[in-house]
Amino acid sequence: MNAALAVLAPLAAFLPSVTLVERAWMEGVSAPPKALLTALLPTLIGMVAFASRGQLGLAVFFAAWNLRAGRLVMERRAAGSAALPSFRRIHALGRETRWWIGGFVVVWLVDGLWERVG
């Protein structure tokens, strides 16, 4: 049971963060002031937890995600527009999000295989 929870922990930290970051990005300036912190909280906690367990691949990936996601949301807020972003920008965010999710799956699998081998 504990092994299953340990395997699913990265997934449980990353996917909610992705969804909340996308929501904060879409809302832009009309998002609550704490929306970014709330969105990144699962991966911030995960980053610390995985680094303390020696899972540096996941910790570094989460750090990179936090930096990029924070920058995306802050840039959108700095634009100052309350209007929805253009379809082109939404599509670009979706494409980038797919790359991040794909990268997460690769890091997650490699980290899991590395633990079994090591």
Image (spheres, helix red, strand yellow):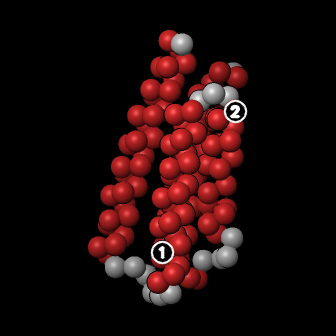
Point 53% across, 79% down: residue: 77
Quarter of the image with the N terminus is: top right
Quarter of the image with the C terminus is: top right
Looking at the picture, which amino acid does disc 2 mark?
Answer: Ser
Point 50% across, 12% down: residue: 117
Looking at the picture, which amino acid does disc 1 mark?
Answer: Glu
Going from N to C along the chain, the mark reached first, 1 or 2, is: 2
Crowding near pointer 2: few (<14 within 10 Å), some, many (20+)?
few
As drawn, 88 above or below 107? below
Q: Locate residue 23 relative to residue 43 in the image: left or right.
A: left
Percent x, y of residue 48: 68, 41
Point 62% across, 57% down: residue: 40
Q: Quadrant of residue 11?
A: top right
Point 44% across, 26% down: residue: 110
Q: Can residue 24 be seen?
A: yes
Q: Locate residue 116 relative to residue 3 in the image: left or right.
A: left
Give the labeled residue for mark 1: 75
> Label 1 vs label 2: CA separation?
31 Å
Mark 1 touches mark 2? (CB < 8 Å): no
